[in-house]
Image (cartoon, rainbow, N blue to C red):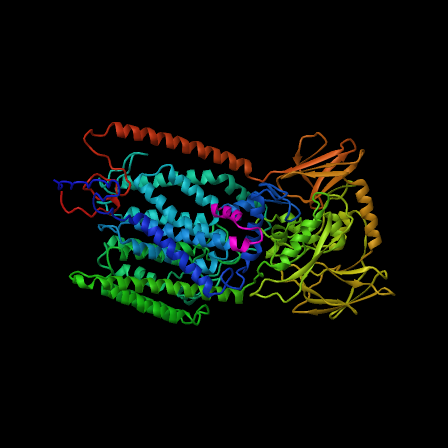
Amino acid sequence: MPPAAPPVPAPARDGVRGGPRPSRNPLLLAPAGAGALTAAVFVLATALARSHPLGPYTRNVVDLGQQYLPYHAYWRAFLLGDTHGDAFLNWNSGFGAGFLGDIGTYLSSPFSLLVVLFPADRPELALYVITALKITSAGAAMAALLIRLRPAGRPGGPWPLAALLGAAYALSGWTFNHGASVPMWLDGLIAFPLLCLVAEWARAGRRPVLGPLVVAAAWTANFYTAYMATLGAALFLAVRLLTADPETAPAPRTAGGPETPGASGTTARRRLAALLRAGWTVGLGIGLAAPLVLVVFSGTKYADPTPETVFAPASWPELLGRFLPATANVDTPALFIGTPALLLALTLPFNRAVAPRVRLGWTAPAVLVTLSLQWGPTHLLWHAGASPNGNPYRQAFVLCGLLLIAAWFSAAPGVPRPAALLGAAALLGALALAARSSADIDAWSYPAAAAALLLALAACALAPRAGRPAASRALPVAGAVLLLAAQAGESAVSGMRTEWQQRADVAWAPRIGAWQRAVAAEVARADAWPAYRTDPGPLPGGNEPLLLGGEGADAYSSLTTENTSRTLDSLGFGHYAKGRHPETLDNPVTDAIFSIGARIRSEATEPVRQDAAPRGGATATLTPVPPLVTVHPAGNATVDPADSAFRNQELLLGSSVYALPAVRRTGTTLTARCPAGSEVWFWAPEFKGTAALAGAAPADYDGRPPAVRAPMRALGTVPPGGRVRVELLPEGRTTLPRQSVGCLDRSRLAAAVTRLTATGATRVTTTGHGLTAELPPGSTGTAVVAVPRATGWRCAAGDAEPVSARSHRGLLAVPLDGRATRVSCSFRPPGVRLGAAAGGAALFALLATALLARRRARRTRSGSHPGRQEFTGRPHEARPGAQDADYAPRRTGA
């Protein structure tokens, strides 16, 4: 018989203590401690690196400055109703681009909503705070998971250890090297421990409604890394089903009903039931996220394809070197979790105080996942069947999490014995020795790791042991301080050095300053959408229309459509990111084609540096251009990207405006003859170097196929006599198109603009994702809308039913029969209907699950023994004398 329950102390009244102080709740203290520690160390690392906002140096490296910063700036304006478009369409970028897919790719995290709390001119601060909060939340989520994982046959471990290991997960090398500069991936970092908690609920038959909601939140926030986190959580569940102590494994609750601890253990039937519950939970959650996920998935089918990548595994010294601090490389897996945490994880195989099945169960997946990083088929599995271009180890955060779970199972029951610590230290030494030839090793790597290892071993030596006298209680406190200093100090140093290396080794954009504000002010003054477009022009970074306003060509998205990229390429525009980042083109013919009536030209007034926000001036130039909708004769509607950008421009304009001379090439000199006074334009998309017209300043070209395509550039005016001589100064091999030189006649262009204006739309109005144009009576031929044709556009002439839009040389086209005086087009993202249907079905299934759970809960309560007090499953609410189920020790007798 169990001992009688002790009397419950009377509650305090009128401020008088009626009993002892309530015990602290480790389920709350662990995540709170992990969050506080994570935030402090991340901020410290930023300060040590002297990065903005805690220093003068830019944080805008690679995609952080080119994608996430502009998208968050636009997101703020969108949420506050200050944009032309809506959730379906973004009128600012790429001459009109789908936006719902970009929301699902970059902005659907709940943390992104916080951008509205910051001033419009401080998007960098907003993004830094959002990044810090995501990393902090990841640490808290991992600690919340760990504190709920009881080592087999042991009470729950100490919450300070769970907090420390949670912070180690959030401050891993993956976070500093990848997550901090690609903030959307941080949602996957949060998702992994949360999905592991969902797996625990499925194993116990608990939370039938909350589980799917957590899955849905993870997949909505960032489905790409949530997919990887889901694979990791499935592995976690499999190991738990095989290793959880059958005497302490919770029995399944009837859905929504109270949990009965203990019972018959993890039998084959229980394991199968847990797997089915987990599958149902994940299926419901993904279904709820389908309205966004399917839109993104559909968008990838029409996105500009990047060149196929053949996976090449990193060498083993490089892989092992990434376990060490202060290493940074996008081509090798970032696996640093801190030397103290790694030491504890490596003690698990040697820790004889842990049950053999637990040692094997958590050592094996860590080893197998490490091996999976290096094998082609599993590499494709982790990345949903498509090898990514760049950063081939995006799933490394899952391995970091598994290592920290292993550390918890080894250290939570108590400090590992000296033999286990020595075995782990030997493994660490062998790892460090094997990694000595890695190019990723930094000057700080070995000193920081050695210092952290010594402090960690000293902390373990000071840990409490059986028989230690009470007078030595200060020693465990000192040991905890040493362990905290080792883990936190090494993480801060690693974060600092990673930022330094990134600034030195990768592309970067300057901080936002007076230059960008001057351009934004000019854009606001000149903008007259939809009468004409305003192009903010090029600045260091990218996605200027999202950051500064206007309606330009520049757009950088993983979902930039293939048609947009190919159409702009064929007209002489340049691009980055293998086609997914079209850049603006300052050319009067394309300005007329796309109705760019205001163009902002700006330049920095001082050198652009990493440690200062740039200053610069800006001016707006207004030019008469045709309306957004023009009328063209019916006829050939295709372009040939490989032919001539000059000819393709003329075909879309509907007039001949260039003289296209025969070009003679002699070495690095091009000669041709053009009408005197015309403008010389040079088109060489694959050329890297400079090109200069005799007597004029050189123009820079940066063609690096397939990643970078150089735009068409003006070289100067044809001199009297008509002889054109272009001198090239190439960097490497020179590849030129057949028609590399065109001479523009401005008077012909003005006549073409006048004609298109006279026959084009008399009035254009736009909505969030639609456009309507009034045409002159009797218009025949084809109405051409200056928007790249993409799947999802539907158009109609007059009162006809909208149909899928046609294409006229890559732009939207509507056939005219002479009777219609109005054309209209609207955009609906591909996949949105199917996603809505799937989401509705999943919501119905979730409601049915909730109702069934409620009914079973009522049935269970009505059938319970009248004298029995029910266990609620919440900490500190069990019947008197009983321990919380998460902390119940193993029973030794009947």
Is residue 707 something one can see in this rendering? no
Magenta region: which residues? 109-126
Q: Quadrant of the N terminus?
A: top left
- Residue 486 location, quadrant: bottom left
Q: In this image, 255 relative to 564: left or right?
A: left
Identified at 66% across, 47% down, the residue is 95
Identified at 60% across, 41% down, the residue is 86
- How far across and down, in percent of the image, does residue 109 sit? 48, 46
Q: Could you tell me how many numbered marks the image carries?
A: 0
For the residue pair 217 and 403, the one nearer the viewer reads as 217
For the residue pair 402 and 31, the one nearer the viewer reads as 31
Residue 118 in magenta stretch: yes
- How far across and down, in percent of the image, does residue 529 sit? 69, 44
**Image position of 457 with respect to 125: above or below:** below
Is residue 155 something one can see in this rendering? yes
Q: Quadrant of the C terminus?
A: top left
For the residue pair 364 and 421, the one nearer the viewer reads as 421
Q: In this image, 34 relative to 156: left or right?
A: right
Hey, which residue is sitting farthest right in the picture? 721
What secondary structure do most residues of the magenta stretch adopt? helix
**Image position of 234 with respect to 370: above or below:** above
- How far across and down, in percent of the image, does residue 213 sit? 41, 40
**Image position of 6 with respect to 717: above or below:** above
For the residue pair 695 and 511, the one nearer the viewer reads as 511
Identified at 48% across, 64% down, the residue is 499
Q: In this image, 173 relative to 428: left or right?
A: right
Residue 25 in magenta stretch: no
